[in-house]
Image (cartoon, grey):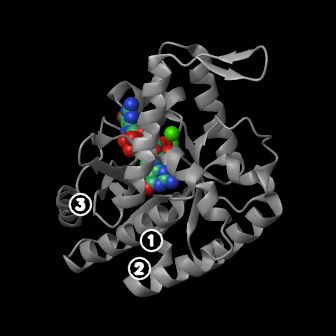
Amino acid sequence: VKEQGKNNFQFYTSEMNEMISKKMKLEIGLRKALERNEFKVVYQPQVDVCTGKVIGAEALIRWHHPEMGNISPAEFIPIAEETGLILPIGDWVLYEACHQSKQWHKEGCPPLRIAVNISSRQFQQHHFIGTVTKILKKTGVAPSHLEFELTESIIQDSKHAISTMQQLKDMGISLSIDDFGTGYSSLSYLKTFPIDTLKIDQSFIRNIFTDPKDASLVSTIINMAHNLDLKVIAEGVETLEQLNFLKQRRCNEAQGYFFSRPISAEEMRGIFQNQSIT
Ligand code: C2E
Ligand code: CA
Ligand code: CA
Ligand code: CA
């Protein structure tokens, strides 16, 4: 029990202590992870719903901590964002994904689109455009083969966000809104922001057959997107029934365990090479 002022006691349970020390351990580990080469990037195929062809892949970071083992990005990305470590980590993921994309191309794969998650903090940096330009130049990747997945939180600083997005669009990079429908923001940004794609959050897809409201939401998002000339991709597609539902409603693309879990660059190359033959 720690005393804070006169009547103000704060109780720390051992569980809370454990949580705090785990978070501290993760933060200390994160500071060293880049130089120790503990990160890698895995790739999850993104499929054209109409043709069934893989048209791209999303890059997802993985971290293997020497003692704690594999740590989920859902756990360490928020800590990286809080501490600012997301800036060097985010730059590393972008470089790695672009470098890999060029590598696949050299190995005879047709050029495919790579989607990279960009955290708000990374996007709001003043030299973000400069960093992107440098990485594209260094790796020789065509901007038209790159897509950035942004969350609705970037819309908070709307003036800066629009101008950065427009610069990225002018370079030829596509932009999608990740986890669409979970950000509680007004929809009006859809008419002012230069966006190409809405990515329907997996929480809606999960329940389309158990919750009729989720089914209506998914149908409504697809129709709205098409009326606004935006493409739609569904994430978290795990079953054929879910895929058929999306196909019937003319969702453009899908991604999820039904097609493939996130896989290594080598496994992804196999998929890309098979595509070029068919
Ligand atoms: P996200 O961007 O929404 O990525 C989708 C997450 O859903 C990924 O989890 C993916 O592995 C998982 N997933 C894909 N298909 C299915 C499916 O059919 N069913 C289920 N249940 N899950 C599926 P992951 O890789 O653990 O990443 C979690 C989150 O961490 C990501 O959510 C993203 O917000 C963040 N993240 C991952 N990599 C990066 C990165 O390089 N940079 C940044 N800023 N964030 C990242
Ligand atoms: Ca994403
Ligand atoms: Ca998502
Ligand atoms: Ca998510």
Give how far across and how far down residue 21 sits, in percent.
44, 35
Q: CA distance from mark 2 to mark 3?
A: 16 Å
Q: Which residue occupies 24% across, 43% down? A: 67
Q: Nearer the viewer, mark 1 or mark 2?
A: 2
Q: Nearer the viewer, residue 127 or 267?
A: 127
Q: Say above or below: 241 vs 79.
A: above
Q: Which residue occupies 66% across, 32% down? A: 220
Q: Identify the mark nearer the N-term, 3 or 1.
A: 1
Q: CA distance from mark 3 to mark 1?
A: 17 Å
Task: Kindly tell me whether residue 252 is visible in this rendering.
Answer: no
Q: Which residue occupies 23% across, 60% down? A: 265
Q: Nearer the viewer, mark 3 or mark 1?
A: 3
Give how far across and how far down residue 100 sits, in percent.
30, 70
Q: Identify the mark nearer the N-term, 2 or 3.
A: 2
Q: Which residue occupies 50% across, 16% down? A: 13
Which residue position is annotated with label 3? 265
Q: Nearer the viewer, residue 50 or 102?
A: 102
Mark sitting on residue 145: 1
Which residue position is annotated with label 2? 141
Tag 1 near tag 2, CB within 8 Å = yes
Q: Residues within 10 Å of mark 1 (few under 14, many from 20)?
A: some
Tag 2 near tag 3, CB within 8 Å = no
